[in-house]
Amino acid sequence: MKGRADGERGKTMRHLVLGDDEWAGAEGFGRAEVIPLHEEAEEPRPARGTRRAGGLLVACGLALLPWLYVLATGLPATATAAHWPLAWVGLDAPEALGLIATGLLAARGDRRHALTAAATATLLVVDAWFDTTTAAPGGDFATAVAMALGAELPLAALCGRLALRALRRHA
């Protein structure tokens, strides 16, 4: 048997086709029958609004690249924040809410847990980054690294895995 691919209205199908040698020995068969084995799904084209939003996001991301240089060369080495505790509470509170929401949704089997898991994983990675990069040398830095390696990054990995598994399962 020989395999070949044919197109039908933009879709790709794979067929099994018997060759002349195989038909010569077969009795009672007048014409070759094409049997589709697998039909590959065609990716739908995104809506025009989605394509425009994607282009806008790419443009904004590219526009930020020169700004990164300005930040890297222009910011002072140290700074004092007037609302330092509020900044950290403002980051850790959504992490806690994200972990709780993801856990509750996942336990119920609600596939929306993929959304909260992805957002929570992002928050946890950002928290680990800022904890370690803003910590004072010595004990504060050691604590930040321990928290990042022992809690924040493993939880981020778990949330990321939950999100990816949910997306693969329902794609």
Image (cartoon, helix red, strand yellow):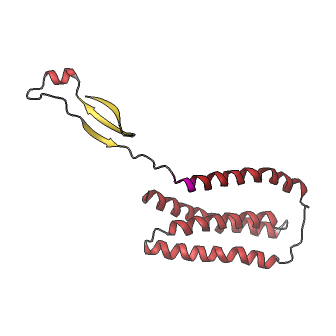
User: Residue 127 lies in what quarter of the image?
Assistant: bottom right
Q: Nearer the viewer, residue 10 or 67?
A: 10
Q: In this rendering, is residue 131 above or below 67?
A: below
Secondary structure predominantly adopted by residues drawn in magenta: helix
Where in the figure is residue 35, as x and y percent of width and height? 24, 37
Where in the figure is residue 86, as x and y percent of width and height? 77, 79
98 in magenta: no
Q: Magenta span covers which residues?
A: 46-50
**For residue 155, side relative to residue 127 (left or right):** left
Where in the figure is residue 126, as x and y percent of width and height? 70, 64
Name the residue: 89% across, 72% down: 80
**For residue 28, side relative to residue 150 (left or right):** left
Quick one: quadrant of the C terminus? bottom left
Q: In this rendering, is residue 20 above or below 153?
A: above
Q: Nearer the viewer, residue 19 or 155?
A: 19
Q: Residue furthest left?
A: 28
Quick one: quadrant of the N terminus? top left
Name the residue: 45% across, 71% down: 110
Q: Nearer the viewer, residue 35 or 134?
A: 35
48 in magenta: yes
**For residue 140, side relative to residue 18 (left or right):** right
Name the residue: 56% across, 56% down: 50
User: Residue 116 lies in what quarter of the image?
Assistant: bottom right
Name the residue: 76% across, 54% down: 64
